[in-house]
Image (tube, rainbow, N blue to C red):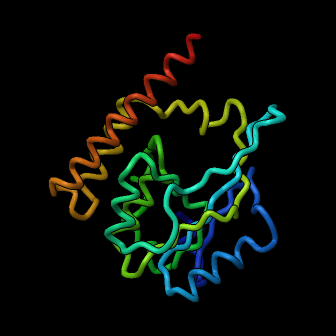
Amino acid sequence: RRGVEASRGEWIMFVDSDDELHDADAVAFLMQKAMTLDLDIAYGSNIRMIEGKSDGEFESRFDREGEYTPKDFRDYVLSPACICCQWGCVSRRELWHSDVFPPTGVRLPSEDVYTDMLLCNHLTRNVGLYNRAVYNYYMVAGSLSLASPYQTERLWQRFYDELERRLDGADTPAVQRALNVRKIHNLCVSICLLNAKFL
């Protein structure tokens, strides 16, 4: 959050300290799409690299590709199929209002998904999804991504309570249905993670 607030450029991209860009042309590819097509956000796919496995490298790809209206993109973000993360895209600085960040002092199970959903409140242009690898995401054993202590029922409930309070249109039947599907999906994932600890 502090980095975004201190930024002065027109565009923002995040790179976690333990990851890296896929190649030297990754940002140029995303910026070319964003500028040429007048997008608010341009996402690329990512390469997942699992620690300690010789065959543990695979590309995480979108199940759809192209440009999507703000409404269509929000529908995608609300679905469990969404693989969007803030470290795999370039986005306009003007989207980053203070209300897109998680509540201060609260760790949520998925801050990327939470932020992606709330960025939808501020979209005025299309969003692009492209199956061109731009990011190397390292999945390290014991990391928060793989063994998160935040994947609990209580924190997922806080996650959805905050979304329903802050997401535009959260009280409509279509969005409520989508959120309920995600709740069931996250509950199943949490149960699997809990059981895995005892295997």
Front residue (pair 49, 132) = 132
Quarter of the image where one finds residue 46: bottom right
Extreme residue in the top direction = 199
- Horizontally, residue 173 falls left or right of residue 151, namely left
Q: Position of residue 154 (x, y in %)?
A: 35, 31
Foreground pick, 1 / 44 = 44
Location of residue 189 with respect to 64 vertically, above or below: above
On screen, residue 162 versus residue 22, left or right, reads left
Please state if 72 lies on the left or on the right of 170 as rendered: right
Residue 70's spot in the image, x, y percent? 36, 72
Q: Residue at x 52, y 86 (%)?
A: 37
Quarter the C terminus occupies: top right
What's the residue at 35%, 63% (across, down)?
74
Residue at horizontal 39 percent and vertical 58 percent from the top: 76
The correct choice, above or below, for 39 with respect to 132 in the image is below
Residue extending farthest right = 54
Report the front residue among 128 and 51: 128
Q: Where is residue 185 drawn, in percent x and y?
A: 38, 36
Q: Is residue 153 above or below residue 198?
A: below
Query: Tag count in the figure?
Result: 0
